[in-house]
Amino acid sequence: MKALFLEEINGPIRLVNTETPQVSEGQVLVELRAAALNHRDVWIRKGQYAHLRFPFIPGSDGAGFMGNEPVVINPGIQWGENPMFQAQDFHILGMPTNGTFAQKVLVPADQIYPMPDHLSFEEAAAIPLSGVTAFRAVMTRGKVKYTDRVLITGIGGGVALWAMQFALATGAEVWVTSGSEEKIEKAKAMGATGGFSYRDPDWIDGARNTIAFDLVIDGAGGAGLGQIMKICSPGGRMVCYGGTTGSIPKLSPQLLFWKQLQLIGSTMGSPQDFKEMISFICDHRIVPVVDRVYPLEQGEEAYTRMEHGNQFGKIVLQIPE
């Protein structure tokens, strides 16, 4: 079978012919038709990830056939019994196990879910990792309500866009931040009420005089998250699912306790989260945002686009039969 291999840190993404994996008890072989990139794939390539193992086939997101049935793969393996947090041996498809940037992938049988019938393979491949991360942050941990005013930071990335789509589907009022006015306008075209440029050093002060948020969904952390506390409503919830800009300096305990805020951590999602997410997507006929589709042999170009951060939506690889 054809697959993309990464052989070393900062190495090239090479298309190779390799042996089809052998099925053992409790596993199934999925014939993939599409796979999607995540920032995780870029971090692994740079060596910024734990328990690295080379060479390997990257990729966490995938959709294809199990037999004759169209399926989508839950990449979060061995979550454990407690729905509140993942077990110590929890891991994500695509490191340390071989992933979805291949014609076939071997996964545990309980990681397979029916593919939503209103989506193409390319669209379905855009769901798994970012989708379940967003669903858990917005629905399970953030407990969004239709009466909420929601702020989603860093719109354009996969998790942030899914978070916006899930929140909008509940009837909540959604606002976004971005460093790109074009991305803010695209989000508004999808239903967001408005947005703020985080490149404006005074945006927090401008917003706090006119608006307050009941729920914040943030994947950046850094100094910005501490500042966003200023524009939270009393009793508001702040869900943090990532930390791309680092630790949070100058986080005010006074704001935290006086406003009775909740600062909530969230990552990935349990099997129940994934099941509920697929049902929610089907019930609301949600179509994920696909930024660009590349053939499998253009994996290097797909990685480059992801690394530059210009995308609005998911970057997808189309996999040949």
Image (tube, rainbow, N blue to C red):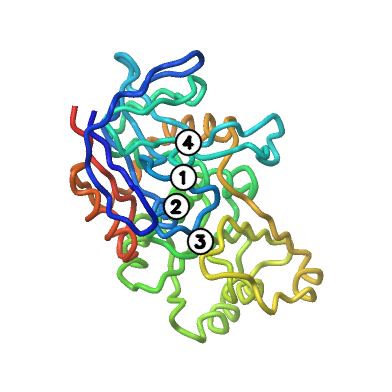
How many angstroms separate mark 4 from mark 2 (CA)? 12 Å
Callout 3 amino acid: Ile
- Which residue position is annotated with label 2? 40
In the rendered view, would you say 95 is above or below 20? Answer: below
Mark 4 surroundings: few (<14), some (14-19) or many (≥20) residues within 10 A: many
Q: Where does the C terminus fall, quadrant-wise?
A: top left
Residue in the image at 49% along x and 48% along y: 52
Pick whichever, 16 or 220, lies toward us.
Answer: 16
Among the two numbered marks 1 and 3 on one chain, the one whose residue lies closer to the N terminus: 1
How many angstroms separate mark 3 from mark 4 (CA)? 24 Å
Q: Where does the N terminus fall, quadrant-wise?
A: top left
- Which residue position is annotated with label 4? 75
In the rendered view, would you say 321 is above or below 88? Answer: above
Which residue is farthest bottom? 202
How many angstroms separate mark 2 from mark 1 (CA)? 14 Å
Residue in the image at 78% along x and 64% along y: 260
Badge 2 marks a residue whose secondary structure is: helix
Callout 4 amino acid: Pro
Q: Nearer the viewer, mark 4 or mark 1?
A: 1
Among the two numbered marks 4 and 2 on one chain, the one whose residue lies closer to the N terminus: 2
Callout 1 amino acid: Arg
Mark 3 surroundings: few (<14), some (14-19) or many (≥20) residues within 10 A: many
- Which residue position is annotated with label 1? 53
Residue in the image at 44% along x and 24% along y: 113
Disc 1 to disc 3: CB gap under 8 Å: no
- From the top left corner, tell me how far across and down residue 273 is, in percent: 57, 35
Q: Can residue 120 be seen at all in this image of the molecule?
A: no
In the rendered view, would you say 268 is above or below 226? Answer: above
Residue in the image at 37% along x and 52% along y: 8
Q: Nearer the viewer, mark 1 or mark 3?
A: 1
- Which residue position is annotated with label 3? 152
Disc 3 to disc 4: CB gap under 8 Å: no
